[in-house]
């Protein structure tokens, strides 16, 4: 699956685009939450921006699966496949 990071997250993750193989089986598809956990393992600084102390998302990073917010899908339990693209957006300001 492809991961795309935008704005300040590019620096945090060491790039804007990269591929991540999934650990999935037909009976247990991978989820967005599992991918994010693996991403945090590889980039620990992401944890503070992603997870609150209570284990919920901070809301700082918007996570899109194929252009749709996971908030409106199944959240972190949303199934994901190798053909999908996960996009990560920090807050953006300007005018």
Image (tube, rainbow, N blue to C red):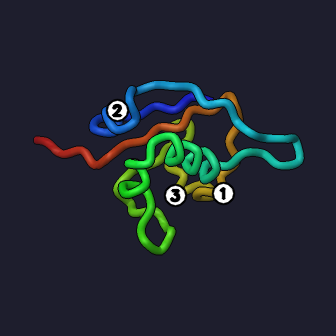
Of all residues, the one furthest to the left in this rendering is 95
Tell which tag, 1 or 2, sits nearer the viewer.
2
| Residue 23 percent across, percent down from the top left | 74, 39
Asked if residue 93 lies left or right of residue 89, the reply is: left
Element under label 2? helix
Q: CA distance from mark 1 to mark 2?
A: 25 Å
Disc 2: which residue: 10
Q: Residues within 10 Å of mark 2 (few under 14, many from 20)?
A: some
Number of labels in the image equals 3
Q: Any mark on residue 86, and which?
A: none
Element under label 1? helix
Residue at left offset 63%, top offset 32%: 84
Residue at left offset 46%, top offset 31%: 4
Disc 1: which residue: 77
Tell which tag, 3 or 1, sits nearer the viewer.
1
Element under label 3? helix
Picture layout, residue 70 above or below residue 55: above
- In this view, the residue in front, 35 or 64, is 35
| Residue 26 percent across, percent down from the top left | 87, 41
Q: Mark 3 and mark 2 in contact? Answer it, CB < 8 Å.
A: no
Q: Mark 1 and mark 2 in contact? Answer it, CB < 8 Å.
A: no
- In this view, the residue in front, 19 or 80, is 19
Q: Residues within 10 Å of mark 1 (few under 14, many from 20)?
A: few
| Residue 69 percent across, percent down from the top left | 50, 49
Residue at left offset 54%, top offset 57%: 72
Q: Any mark on residue 71, and which?
A: 3
Q: CA distance from mark 3 to mark 1?
A: 10 Å
The quarter of the picture where the N terminus appears is: top right
| Residue 90 percent across, percent down from the top left | 32, 46
Q: Residues within 10 Å of mark 3 (few under 14, many from 20)?
A: some
Q: Mark 3 and mark 1 in contact? Answer it, CB < 8 Å.
A: no
């Amino acid at each position: 699956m492809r991961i795309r990071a935008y704005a300040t997250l590019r620096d945090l993750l060491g790039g804007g685009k990269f591929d991540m193989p999934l650990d999935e089986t037909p009976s247990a598809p991978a989820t967005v939450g599992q991918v994010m956990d693996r991403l945090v393992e590889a980039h620990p600084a992401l944890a503070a921006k992603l997870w609150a102390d209570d284990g919920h998302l901070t809301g700082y990073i918007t996570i899109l699966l194929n252009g749709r917010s996971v908030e409106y899908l199944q959240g972190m339990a949303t199934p994901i496949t190798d053909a999908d693209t996960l996009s990560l957006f920090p807050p953006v300001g300007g005018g």
